[in-house]
Image (spheres, rainbow, N blue to C red):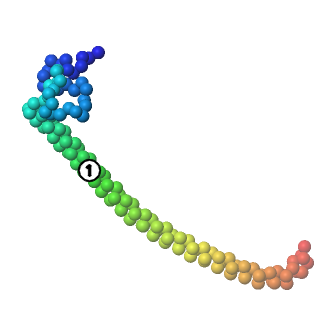
């Protein structure tokens, strides 16, 4: 198991206080074995924090840039898809109108044929006695 940080031979690494309490203040004498960081250590820690913050900011900037590009691609694709959908709907409407027109022509042809068949029905009634005669 590792030794506590207070037993570390490196004096630049501050050891955590053994008993943190609200009564501790910078002007209070430090307990034995706890070294407070000096100005150089504080400056080094601040520089490390600033470097980390800058790296995080760069990471977020990169993330937002890639999200912006992805959103632009999706928006562009959506616009292209909507244009394509409009073309498809237009062609479908044209096809439906053409099919409807052909269906109406077919229905009208059937109605004319029905009228002609009714005329032939009276002729068949008239010819029936003669057809029966030849049987």
Of 98 and 36, which appears nearest the observer? 36
Q: Which residue is drawn at 19% across and 17% down?
A: 7
Is residue 120 positioned above or below 68 on the image?
below
Q: Is residue 13 visible?
A: no
Is residue 77 positioned above or below 131 on the image?
above
Of 128 and 101, which appears nearest the observer? 101
Q: Which residue is drawn at 17% across and 43% down?
A: 54
34 sits to left or right of 88: left
Of 122 and 39, which appears nearest the observer? 39
For the C terminus, the image quarter is: bottom right
The spot of residue 45 in percent (x, y) is: 14, 34
Q: Is residue 103 visible?
A: yes
For the N terminus, the image quarter is: top left
The spot of residue 100 in percent (x, y) is: 57, 73
92 sits to left or right of 76: right
Of 58 and 116, which appears nearest the observer? 58
Other-residue count near label 1 (Cα within 10 Å), few / some / many at <14 / 14–19 / ≥20: few
Is residue 43 positioned above or below 30 on the image?
below
The spot of residue 40 in percent (x, y) is: 8, 32
Query: Splitting the image into 4 quarters, where does residue 2 fall?
Result: top left
Q: What element carries label 1?
A: helix
Q: Which residue is drawn at 17% across and 24% down?
A: 31
Q: Name the residue under label 1.
A: 64
Q: Residue furthest left?
A: 40
Q: Which residue lies furthest to the top in this view?
A: 1
């Amino acid at each position: 198991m590792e030794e506590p940080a207070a037993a570390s031979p490196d004096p630049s690494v501050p050891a955590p206080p053994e008993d943190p309490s609200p009564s501790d203040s910078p002007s209070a004498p430090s307990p034995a074995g706890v070294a407070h960081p000096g100005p150089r250590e504080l400056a080094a820690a601040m520089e490390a924090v600033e470097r980390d913050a800058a790296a995080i900011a760069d990471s977020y900037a990169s993330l937002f840039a890639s999200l912006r590009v992805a959103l632009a691609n999706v928006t562009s694709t959506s616009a292209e898809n909507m244009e394509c959908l409009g073309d498809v709907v237009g062609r479908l409407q044209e096809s439906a109108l053409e099919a409807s027109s052909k269906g109406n022509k077919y229905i009208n042809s059937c109605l004319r044929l029905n009228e002609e068949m009714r005329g032939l029905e009276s002729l068949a009634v008239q010819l029936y006695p003669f057809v029966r005669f030849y049987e």
